[in-house]
Image (cartoon, grey):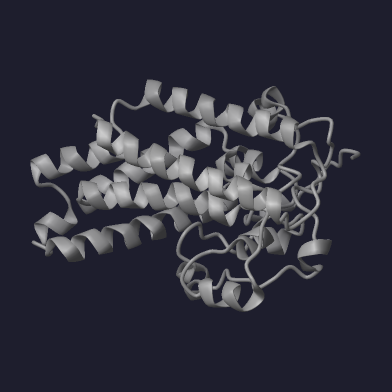
Amino acid sequence: MSTGWEMGVRLGVFAAVFALMAIWEILAERRARRCSRRRRWLANLGLVVLDAAVVRLVFPLTLVGAAMMAEAHGSGLLPGLSVPPVVALSASVIVLDLALYLQHVLFHAVPALWRLHMVHHADLDFDLTTGLRFHPLEIVLSLALKIGVVVLLGAPPLAVLIFEALLNGTSLFNHGNVSLPAKLDMATRWLLVTPDMHRVHHSVERVEANSNFGFCLSWWDRLLGTYRQSPEAGHDGMQIGLSHLQSRANQSLPWLLALPFRGTTGAYPLSDTGKRGARSEEA
C-alpha cells in the first residue's frame, strides 16, 4: 500500500536535502577526500537503486502503508489508550527514532548483523552518500523491524511520514563532509545529531565506532551512555572506515554486495566475538 503524496513528500525532501548538502560539501569541504568522488558515488548510489528495487520486491507495504492498515483496524498501543492525536503524532516520531537508535546498537552487537552493517562503515570517506550506503539485506531487516514497531505502536500515518522524511534528511545531513561553527554545533547537538558528532562513529578506533549511534535525535546517546564529544585524534586527524578494510582498490558495488560474506568482521562489534583477529588490507 502506497500513495502518490507519500512518495512525493519523501522524494521531495530527499532531493532538496541531497542538493543542498552536495553544494555545501563542494563549497566548504570539511576533510580532504581519500578516494575519487565519482568512484564512490557510483557504488554508494548504486546501492540506493538496488535497495529500492529489493524493498519493492520483498514488501507489499511501505512503512506508511503499514500505519494506514493498522489505523484501519484500530490496532496498536496508542489507539488502545485513546491517546490524543497531537500526542500520538509526537510520541510516535520520538519512539520510532528511539527504535532506530536501538536497532543501530543491535547491528553493532550481533556479529551476523554487523557483517551487513560493515558495508556502511567500510566507506573510506565520509560524505552525504555514506548516509545512503547500506547492504540490501540490512535495509530489508531494518524495514521489517520498523514495520513491527509501527504496527505495535499504532503510529498515525502522518507521524510515520514525518519520521521517514526526517530520517532521509538527517541521514544526509549528519553524514555530510561539512561542519557547523563550533558554538552552533554544540548547541545543535543537544537536540539533533550533527556531522561532527556522527563522524566520530565512523572512526577506525573501536571505542569511537561504538559511540554516537543516533541518526536524528541526539538524546539517546546522552541518556544511554554512548555519547562521545569528539575523536581522540581530532576530526582532521581521525581515520575513517574499518582498520582491516583500507584498500582503495575495493569499494566497487560488487565488492560491497559480497563484503558481508567474506573475510573477518574485524574488532568492531560490541560483542566479545568481534575482538578476534582483524585481517589488514594494504591501502
**In the picture shown, does residue 271 fall above or below 11?**
below
**Left or right position of 28 against 87:** right
Question: Residue visible at 61% across and 60% down?
Answer: 195
Q: Residue 127: percent from the left, percent from the top?
A: 66, 48
**Displayed quadrant of residue 261:** top right
Q: Residue at the far right: name it.
A: 282
Q: Residue 252: percent from the left, percent from the top?
A: 72, 27
**Displayed quadrant of residue 118:** top right
Q: Is residue 261 visible?
A: no
Q: Residue 248: percent from the left, percent from the top?
A: 83, 36
Question: Residue visible at 23% across and 29% down?
Answer: 1
Question: Residue visible at 69% across and 48% down?
Answer: 26
**In the picture shown, does residue 122 fall above or below 163?**
above
Question: Residue visible at 22% across and 52% down?
Answer: 155
**Left or right position of 117 against 218:** right
**Left or right position of 200 against 156:** right
**In the picture shown, does residue 21 fall above or below 209?**
above
Asked whether 201 or 182 is in front, the reply is 182
Q: Is residue 24 visible?
A: yes
Of the 4 image quadrants, the one containing the C terminus is top right
Q: Residue 59: percent from the left, percent from the top?
A: 34, 27
